[in-house]
Image (tube, helix red, strand yellow):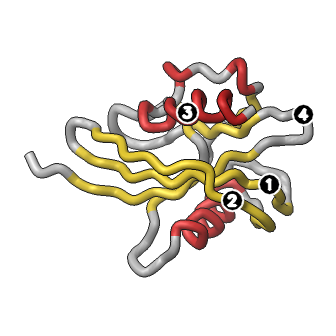
Amino acid sequence: MRVRHFHVAAGILRDASGRLLITERLCDGPFNGLWEFPGGKIAAGESPRDALYRELAEEIGIEIRSSRPFMELLHEYHDRTVNLEFFLVTDWHGDPSGLEGQQIRWVALGELDAGQLLPADAPVIAALLADA
């Protein structure tokens, strides 16, 4: 089996109450219905930050005004390897909504359930708790 490699940028948005935005994953395959931090694949020649800004505009309809790198991790699934670059999105314009038909939820950090998130996103919870 050929292992595919993906490079992904994802955003961590916190509202005024400190809750985090997660989005439902809609796809064909084993990850359908799990939740994730919004983002997507980085295109050839695109910087991770540019990909983040583009993906969040397309997926949840916001214009990022300010962000900073938070963490990078590599996750190996049985059929793919994903290099994820997470950014804290500290300022944006617009109200996030599921432009691709996905549900979105604002969740308190203490209520995030790693079992409901994509396995690659789970380590972010521990890092956010340590950063709090």
Q: Residue furthest left?
A: 1
Drawn side of residue 17 relative to residue 46, left or right = right
Relative vertical location of residue 129 with respect to residue 20 in this rendering, above or below: above
Of badges 3 and 1, nearer the viewer stands 1
Name the N-terminal-most of marks 3 and 2: 3
Q: Secondary structure at mark 1?
A: strand
Q: Quadrant of residue 77?
A: top left
Q: Which mark is residue 90?
A: 1
Name the N-terminal-most of marks 2 and 4: 4
Of badges 3 and 2, nearer the viewer stands 2
Relative vertical location of residue 65 with respect to residue 82 in this rendering, above or below: below
Instruction: Work out how far the residue at label 3 is from the one at label 1, CA to CA, in angstroms.
Output: 21 Å
Disc 1 residue type (three-letter): Thr
Expressed as whole percent of the image width and height from the top left, the position of residue 58 reads 63, 63
Of badges 4 and 3, nearer the viewer stands 4
Drawn side of residue 53 relative to residue 45, left or right = right
Residue under label 2: 68
- Residue 100 can be seen, yes or no: no
Drawn side of residue 80 relative to residue 105, left or right = left
Instruction: Work out how far the residue at label 1 is from the one at label 2, CA to CA, in angstroms.
Output: 8 Å
Drawn side of residue 57 relative to residue 39, left or right = right
Expressed as whole percent of the image width and height from the top left, the position of residue 59 reads 63, 56
